[in-house]
Amino acid sequence: MAAKKSSLNWIIKNLVWGALFVFIIVGAASLFLSIRTRHGKEVTVPDMTSQTVSDASSAAAAAGLRVQVIDSVYMKRMARGAVVSQLPKPGAKVKPGRKISLTINSLVPKKVTMPNLVHVSLRQAKAELLAKGLVLGKLNYVSDIATNNVLEQHYKGRRVEPGRQLYTGSVIDLVIGLNGADAMTYVPNLHGYKYLRAVDALHDNSLNVSGVFFDKSVRTYSDSLNAVVYSQRPSATGYPTVMGTGVTIYLSLDGTKGAD
């Protein structure tokens, strides 16, 4: 009887130790995965446009992020090596440790092949222009069966054929379709946005930049890239407006200007 009781105690003891071991392993694995993935934690991507790669790296590190340069374009008046654009965009929520892809201004201009944007969506056309180092200019809306379908691509006021060699940084205007039943959008709140980010936000909402005004604090091209929007016309009222509407923006180096 004593032998059976001793054997039973041994089995129970081993089962307890086995369960405890499994619990510890599962807990450790869960903790490791939580640390590895920063489960539930997000950080805001800082705006690194117009900064040097060194400054962008420092800004990213301060936010718990990393940067990688993936491409370069040529913009005549922009500082060489400065960040032209970034993905994910400024203000996006990402997990700590995420790599931010940077496109910088190259030292010398290079030529790229003009893509065929006809019959693709505005969103896709915008992505293809960015990938080629070309700049999206004015959105010219005309009546069509499909809204935001690209009908023509223009360079310096004339149609530009796919395959033509252009310098990076060239501005491409698009003729876009507009169906009257699906022609409305909303004006975003641009307050605090730098110039390039503001233009990007307007294009994302199927709107145009109708005017850009800098106050006296902006004296150089670099200043213009670092200035932020303190006022806009029309403002972000929340009411729908027709696609292609122009928005005028006012910028200053004084980040507190225009604040309530």
Image (tube, grey):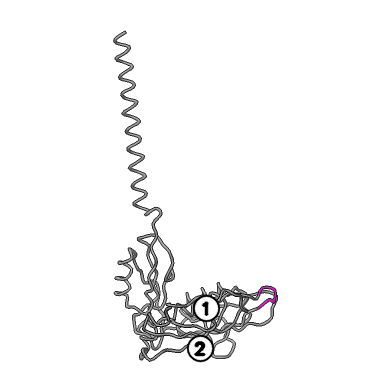
Q: Amino acid at mark 1?
A: Leu
Q: Residue at x 66, y 78 (%)?
A: 178
Above or below, 51 relative to 24: below
Q: Nearer the viewer, residue 170 or 198?
A: 198
Q: Left or right? Give the position of 209 relative to 215.
A: right
Work out which residue is located at the far front of the displayed protein and give it. Answer: 260
**Would you say residue 57 sits in the magenta stretch?**
no
Above or below, 221 relative to 73: below
Q: Nearer the viewer, residue 78 or 213?
A: 213
Q: Left or right? Give the position of 57 relative to 115.
A: left
Q: Main secondary structure of the magenta part?
A: helix
Q: Position of residue 91 (x, y in %)?
A: 42, 69
Q: Left or right? Give the position of 203 relative to 221.
A: right
Q: Position of residue 84 (x, y in %)?
A: 40, 78
Name which quarter of the figure residue 92 lies in. bottom left
The span shown in magenta is: 178-182
**Would you say residue 181 sits in the magenta stretch?**
yes
Look at the image and tell me in which quarter the C terminus lies.
bottom left
Q: Amino acid at mark 2?
A: Gly
| Circle count | 2
Q: Residue at x 36, y 69 (%)?
A: 68
Disc 1 marks which residue?
202
**Label 2: few (<14), some (14–19) or many (≥20) C-alpha neighbours in 10 Å:** few
Q: Position of residue 90 (x, y in %)?
A: 42, 71
Look at the image and tell me in which quarter the N terminus lies.
top left
Q: Residue at x 56, y 80 (%)?
A: 207
Q: Position of residue 94 (x, y in %)?
A: 41, 62
Disc 2 marks which residue?
211
